[in-house]
Image (tube, rainbow, N blue to C red):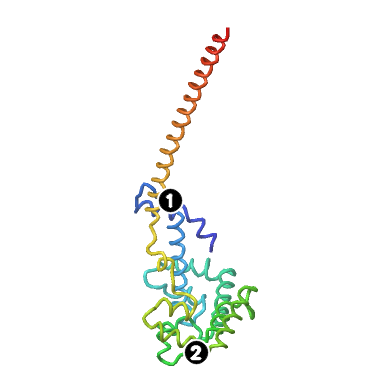
């Protein structure tokens, strides 16, 4: 699938350039193509889920049936033959399905359409030790020593004070960020800590301004160096004249 996408990068970018224009358009190429690739992967996955898996039919049956709404028949058949039927796609799909089975429903980050902090009001309890282990394990063990030490540290803290999570919940009902951090180790984003981050365009303008300032400073340094060399030359000339004058006085 990666091969199909890479082979069409130039064609896709040309289509984007036909619609949008910007003097720094090329600087956005990688970001735009990555975003479009993500949309494409999600879209093709939705097509497979809603039109094959949810209907509990095989790819062969779907191949001969009417394509999804808004999709050309030839495009649908190409997706089934060139994407869904490939060994690589089937292997990745099976692996992801297996990974999802490892997570117990009560430990999922979201209980239905609601996060843990809302589900707690309905009596759903979260064991932080098990949440940490289940969301970080690889096969049947934690991946490295650092993660194992952190897991043991959390377990020791909760064994000393089992009510700690409940106290944190009660004391942080109006602090969504702290609740999210305690519930499932996330919820805080960079912008929540550092505030809104500048856009790519703003960063490029700032970089361009910095370059111009550096150029001005370099010009000033070169001028000062030239002036310094000139002064050294003058001082050397004066010293030579003083030396000749001293020699004449000694005659």
Q: Residue at x 55, y 86 (%)?
A: 158
**Residue 113 visible:** no
- Say how many tags the image has: 2
Nearer the observer, 240 or 77: 240
Where is residue 222 shown, x and y percent of the image? Answer: 46, 32
112 displayed left or right of 146 = left
Q: Secondary structure at mark 1?
A: helix
Estimate how packed mark 1 is, as few (under 14), some (14 to 19) or many (20 or more) residues with alpha carbons within 10 Å. Answer: few
Q: Which residue is mark 1?
A: 27
User: Residue pushed farthest top?
Assistant: 251
Look at the picture and state if 113 lies above or below 240. Answer: below
Look at the picture and state if 33 lies above or below 139. Answer: above
Nearer the observer, 117 or 3: 117
Q: Secondary structure at mark 2?
A: loop
Label 1 near label 2: C-beta < 8 Å? Answer: no
Nearer the observer, 51 or 98: 98
Label disc, if present, on residue 163 of the rendered structure: 2
Where is residue 128 shown, x and y percent of the image? Answer: 53, 84
Q: Residue at x 55, y 15 (%)?
A: 243
**Residue 4 visible:** yes
Look at the picture and state if 88 lies above or below 164. Answer: above
Q: CA distance from mark 2 to mark 1?
A: 52 Å
Q: Residue at x 53, y 86 (%)?
A: 104
Question: Which quadrant holds the C terminus?
Answer: top right
Front tag of 2 and 1: 2
Label disc, if present, on residue 248 of the rendered structure: none
Where is residue 187 shown, x and y percent of the image? Answer: 44, 74
Estimate how packed mark 2 is, as few (under 14), some (14 to 19) or many (20 or more) residues with alpha carbons within 10 Å. Answer: few
Q: Earlier in the sequence, mark 2 or mark 1?
A: 1
Q: Residue at x 56, y 81 (%)?
A: 154
Look at the picture and state if 181 lies above or below 23. Answer: below
């Amino acid at each position: 699938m990666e091969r199909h996408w890479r082979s069409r990068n130039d064609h896709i970018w040309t289509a984007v350039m036909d619609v949008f224009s910007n003097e720094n358009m090329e600087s956005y190429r990688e970001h735009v193509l990555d975003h479009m690739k993500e949309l494409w992967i999600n879209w093709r996955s939705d097509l497979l889920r809603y039109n094959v898996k949810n209907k509990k039919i095989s790819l062969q049956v779907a191949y001969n049936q009417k394509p999804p709404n808004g999709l050309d028949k030839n495009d649908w058949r190409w997706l089934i033959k060139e994407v869904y039927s490939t060994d690589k796609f089937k292997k990745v799909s099976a692996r992801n399905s297996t990974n999802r089975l490892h997570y117990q429903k009560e430990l999922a980050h979201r209980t239905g359409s609601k996060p843990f902090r809302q589900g707690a009001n309905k009596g759903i309890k979260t064991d932080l030790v098990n949440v940490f282990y289940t969301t970080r394990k690889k096969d049947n063990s934690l991946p490295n020593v650092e993660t194992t030490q952190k897991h043991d540290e959390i377990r020791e803290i909760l064994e000393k004070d089992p009510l700690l999570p409940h106290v944190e919940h009660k004391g942080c009902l109006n602090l969504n960020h702290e609740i999210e951090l305690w519930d499932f180790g996330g919820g805080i984003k960079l912008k929540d800590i550092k505030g809104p981050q500048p856009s790519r365009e703003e960063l490029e303008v700032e970089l361009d301004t910095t370059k111009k300032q550096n150029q001005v400073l370099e010009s000033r340094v070169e001028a000062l160096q030239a002036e310094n060399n000139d002064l050294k030359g003058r001082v050397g000339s004066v010293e030579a004249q003083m030396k000749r004058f001293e020699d004449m006085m000694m005659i």
